[in-house]
Amino acid sequence: MKSKLSLFLPLVFVLGLAVVVSCSSSGSKGGMGIGKSSRQRLAIALLESPRAQFANYHVSGRRDNATALDNMKQTAAGVPAARSSYGTAPGGYVQLHPEMLRAMKILTDKGYSFHVTSIAGSSHSSRSRHYLGTAFDINKVNGVPVRSGSPYWREVIRICEGLGATETLGPGDRGHSTHIHVAWPRPPGM
């Protein structure tokens, strides 16, 4: 039986239309078909994973459309992720870094579960890599809150460093007693 895509594509070419077809085969979950960027595919896979959880709130209690969950949904939809606009947060939008998203996916593939509290949103230091879409914060790993004596968080940092993270903070680092922060290099010119 031919897929809907194979029946549709000849029509597109016969008519000479220059379009990008975004579809999925029937029965596939998440619409991970032709036309989706790698960041979209990764965001969709992460949203579908029971191992990756994304906060729908800011730790500060502020409300906006830039929570970790909002950022993942925006990226899955193919639009830039919103940044918060309170405190030192600059507002506006940013594309999430594909290598950062890939690291999250690899963590789930390795069997880790985690709760992300912040990606591009919230208020951080004024030059935070969160605002560049290259950082995320985790407050729980495998259901255990991140604290100095808790297991797993050091392993997550080690894995992320092996995947290109160049800024890693956690318990023992100022302001990170209850979460870990991992970030990838600043894009050129940033």
Image (spheres, helix red, strand yellow):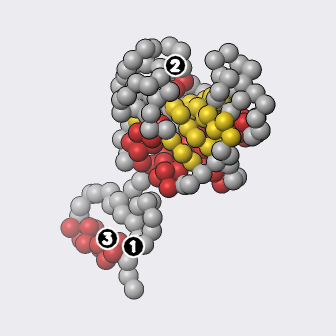
Residue type (three-letter) at the residue carrying disc 2: His
- Dividing the picture into quadrants, the one containing residue 114 is top right
Q: How many marks?
A: 3
How many other residues sit within 10 Å of disc 2, few (<14), some (14-19) or many (≥20)?
some
Image coords of residue 17 (percent x, y):
23, 61
**Left or right: where 39 falls relative to 175:** left
Q: Residue at x 71, y 19 (%)?
A: 173
Of the numbered discs 3 and 2, the one sitting upstream in the chain is: 3
Question: Would you name the residue on which mark 2 appears?
Answer: 124
From this viewpoint, is residue 37 visible?
no
- Dividing the picture into quadrants, the one containing residue 185 is top right
Image coords of residue 1 (percent x, y):
39, 86
How many other residues sit within 10 Å of disc 3, few (<14), some (14-19) or many (≥20)?
few
Of the numbered discs 3 and 1, the one sitting upstream in the chain is: 3
Question: Would you name the residue on which mark 1 appears?
Answer: 26
Q: Residue at x 45, y 68 (%)?
A: 28
| Residue nearer the viewer, 189 or 17 | 189
| Residue nearer the viewer, 17 or 157 | 157
Residue 55 lies, with reference to residue 105, above or below; the image says above
Of the numbered discs 1 and 2, the one sitting upstream in the chain is: 1
Residue type (three-letter) at the residue carrying disc 3: Leu
Label of residue 183 in the image: none
Q: Secondary structure at mark 1?
A: loop
Between circles 1 and 2, the one closer to the viewer is 2
Label 1 to label 2, Cα distance in Å? 43 Å
Q: Secondary structure at mark 2?
A: loop
Label 3 to label 2, Cα distance in Å? 47 Å
Do callouts 3 and 1 mark residues in contact (Cβ within 8 Å)?
Answer: no
Label of residue 9 in the image: 3
Q: Secondary structure at mark 3?
A: helix
**Left or right: where 19 falls relative to 135:** left
Between circles 3 and 1, the one closer to the viewer is 1
